[in-house]
Amino acid sequence: MSSSDLHDLVALPDAHKERLALDLLAELGATNIQRRGTELIHGCLVCPHHTDQARNPTASLNWDRWLYNCFSGSGGTALWLIATVQDTTVEQARAWLTGQAGLNRAMELPDLLNLFDSIYTPTRPEPLPRYADQVLTPWQGIPDYILGERQIPQANASRAGICSSPPGRDREGNYMGRRAVIPHRWNGNLVGWQSRRLERDGTPKYLNTPGFPKDSTLYNPFPEVTGRCLVMVESPMSVLRHGLAIPMRATFGAEITDRQLDLVPPWAETLIWWLDNDTAGWNATESRFTERGHYLEGIAEKTSRRHNVLVVDSPYAADPADLDTPSAEALIHQAAVPWPVWQRPAQLFCHRCHRHAHPGQPCHPPA
């Protein structure tokens, strides 16, 4: 967009821009909206941990700059806000705004499109959320689930800032029990956290903060651990358990983006992929032809242009986080094979008893 176009946008009547912002907030369900200059103060739409929003709203939308801000430190563009509230992508948010939200009464459609073209350019990624470190200060104590059931070493959990959130209420007023909190920092900034349910309270087992950048960052709580070899896994739990002993990064699942692949550090001469031993992990790792004959490059082949790529040929029906660190190190050294010869396993075994995998059945390790 040219500078003259931007000048025309700035010249739009303030009343039009404010009306559009009010309509947007109403469409998204904001309450208790108060005008303060160019800011529209309202009940937070993105953070479930805020309470008493009717009397003490904790968020604002600047209708002049089209920036959303939660007073706890998170925020982004208006498109980020829409995508977060509706759990969609920024592109889908833009389509909803211009095609479905019924906001055209504030200005003509061409002006509306131009306005949001000026604050969203596809070649520039959306800014990452950012939270104030003080948000986590009241959440003290590493939960027993982390140290006991998941067997994360105390030093690892402390270094990664693991804590637990107290019971409370979500935005709809529903009870939310204690949760294990896994902070995620990127380039020194707190960009969100994942939390794991600790009691059966009806909430999802795992929750992410709004706009959690799982497709544009890597989980790396131990940046000081480097070397010529880097292991890539899916789950932060794997990094938490082994990351102080093994250079390791997590991708937040098997849906791995090219942007994440570009974040693999150049010091990793050898890159070892060790995704979960399930269909999603296999599909992400291997290159294959679709039923229609289209060739899909897997992450192993994609990254082989810049690294010596190996894949862990694990025989176990277990994630890396399920193994103790000596066992994980042994598999990495003994079972990592060049990516072109790796194949998905025909049979999986229990990592405890070493018999055929028996999901849902009790395990009886050998004496």
Image (cartoon, rainbow, N blue to C red):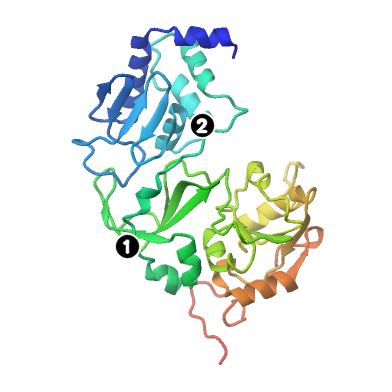
For residue 150, side relative to residue 31 (left or right): right
Q: Is residue 191 above or below residue 282?
A: above
Q: Which residue is mark 2?
A: 90
Q: How many marks?
A: 2
| Residue drawn where x is 43% and y is 27% of the image | 78
Residue 281, image x, y percentages:
63, 57
Under tag 1, what secondary structure?
loop
- Decide if residue 86 is in sight here: yes
Front position in the image: 137 or 63: 137
Under tag 2, what secondary structure?
helix
Residue 11, image x, y percentages:
44, 7
Q: Which residue is mark 1?
A: 200
Amino acid on which the number 2 mark rests in the picture: Val
Amino acid on which the number 1 mark rests in the picture: Arg
Q: Quadrant of the C terminus?
A: bottom right
Please identify the residue farthest to the bottom as the structure is shown: 367
For residue 123, side relative to residue 333 (left or right): left
